[in-house]
Image: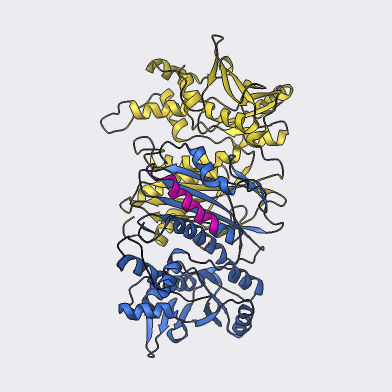
Chain colours: A yellow, B blue
Amino acid sequence: VKGVDEFALIRLLTERKLPNEGQSGVFVGIGDDAAVAAVSPGFHLVLSCDTMVQETHFKKTTMKCTDIGYKAMASSISDMAAMGAIPRYALVSLSTHKETPVQELQELYDGLYECAEQFDVAVVGGDTTSTSGVLTVSVTIIGEVEPGKALLRSAARLGDVVFITGCLGSSAAGLDYLLTQNRDANGVLAPSIQIAQLMAAHQRPQPQVKAGRLLLQSGLCHALNDISDGLASEAWEIAEASGCGIRLQEKAIPIEPSLQAYADEQGKQAMEWIMYGGEDYQLLGTVPADQAAALQAEFQQRGLCLYVIGEVTSGKTGVELLRADGVLLAIEKKGYNHF
Amino acid sequence: VKGVDEFALIRLLTERKLPNEGQSGVFVGIGDDAAVAAVSPGFHLVLSCDTMVQETHFKKTTMKCTDIGYKAMASSISDMAAMGAIPRYALVSLSTHKETPVQELQELYDGLYECAEQFDVAVVGGDTTSTSGVLTVSVTIIGEVEPGKALLRSAARLGDVVFITGCLGSSAAGLDYLLTQNRDANGVLAPSIQIAQLMAAHQRPQPQVKAGRLLLQSGLCHALNDISDGLASEAWEIAEASGCGIRLQEKAIPIEPSLQAYADEQGKQAMEWIMYGGEDYQLLGTVPADQAAALQAEFQQRGLCLYVIGEVTSGKTGVELLRADGVLLAIEKKGYNHF
């Protein structure tokens, strides 16, 4: 980006998508001091931001530029799903070294826009700064929700069962593959279809906005969280916020066949990735036990998944796992358990 | 922050200010996947973000940690002032090296909160990440404005005069002092009151939210911008967005006595800092010539300043300066002119 001034750079990155004034709700888009946009009458704002830092959250060898952009947007949108909210607008702050080729930033923005469009999110602004450090992308997402209806971590109750909206662990297994496996002469990976699935889970996670909305609209869902830090950590968050115990059942936790195959091949435990991997962006929540079947039916009708994997208990605040072999294991919040 | 996990760190940084659920309009504050907050009925959202990067925007020798936090918040709030909007909520993304002492981050947050409280802004969320690079602070600000009333850069019209809401150049002179002057043995500056004023202008700029609201509510103001990049650059932005010429009058541009004194002492030109310094965060705007006196009176009544410093012309798009000696000078957008 050397020699390109900030205004020219912003135009380069965003002009293919301008004007966004036509996009739903945007009155003033990129190009003034701030954007102006509508919120639906009577709705409340839902606000979150998520930052991805090179070397900390991704490396050049694990993520293409378009993937970095896509995932930065996806992880922010996932926070809206976790509240049952509708994502509407996004602002992007990009800090980049002046030697970074403009094309890489354009690709990063292509990924950002691709994900944003998939979820009807309008990118309305941001900031582009020069840094002597590593590439840093921060996405702030602005959504909306019906007043009093946002799904909180603290709402789990005794009598609830615990559910997830999809299989976990694939993102971590995909990262494991990207970090450890051999590349071909051009540095390009030539993965099998199964491996490609794991890589995609890591590089292009799919925020569960539809599932989140359905959970809110059903009126049945109690607590909700998205799985950014692994099942163990997210279940702990619900347990701590709600002041309850959570007992997971190993037998009930679904395992993606491609994950199981890769784990077997590598002599590793799929359960390790499921519990402590993270970045799956599926939803983890609780629903009254006697309503679970009804909710599951609603999910099925819409082509969505809902797996009941455990229950809320009156025990000590925390998480335990009833292993397939019948042993009840206390689950640490961070990755101290080995299966 | 070594050894402190992210959740513990967020608590350390924000708990002195929690719970913020009591704060006006905040229903869910820091601690869930996202915050939930109200927007005033019928108002539109105003959205902006601003990022400050160590070495690029500040150095340890020019800004204390509290100043970094204060200024990051102030520069974001200034974008609301520049639209005539009311700032309401903020999200903070902080990327920091793991060797950074927690106390420095607490001081940075103290500064953020100090500025936020001054402008009734509730800090409702954010993200804290580890980086191998330099300290990076990104503040997203969410404000609100009456529908159709936001003050845009593109609204300057022939027949308008150009105004500013305060003196310019002090921030740049303060930075000049901080970068060039000797320190005493302890590395502590012992500045005179005049120098302290210039330093404060650089370290603790004051966003002109009251002036912005008054300009909007008066119904008289046409174009508006905040001065983050110097008078030349901001006047150019209005000229380009509005498709007009802007002629500034050197004689009409006020100069802070402390700035003039420092410039004289250093053998430098105050006008250079005014035109190309930036980070003053005063407002630059246009108003119909025949309404300027009425607006000025309204400002005066509220203890605010409004200086008419030029006019909109039908000439070539761009900015020119009628120098005190009668010479008409074409002003470059960036710092190519020397006075």
Residue B73's place in the image compared with B164, above or below, is above
Q: Is residue B319 visible?
A: yes
Q: Residue at x 38, y 72 (%)?
A: B173
Left or right, B16 with respect to B275, comes to right
Q: Quadrant of the N terminus of chain A?
A: bottom left
Q: Nearer the viewer, residue B213 or A300?
A: B213
Residue B310's place in the image compared with A120, above or below, is below
**Relative image position of residue B12 (x, y in whole percent):** 51, 43
Q: Is residue A306 visible?
A: no
Left or right, A330 with respect to A54, comes to right
Residue B191's place in the image compared with A311, above or below, is below
Residue B170, picture quadrant: bottom left
The answer to if B98 sits in the magenta stretch is: yes
The answer to if B154 sits in the magenta stretch is: no
**Relative image position of residue A211 (x, y in whole percent):** 63, 33
Q: Nearer the viewer, residue A287 or A171?
A: A287
Q: Which residues are magenta?
A: B97-114
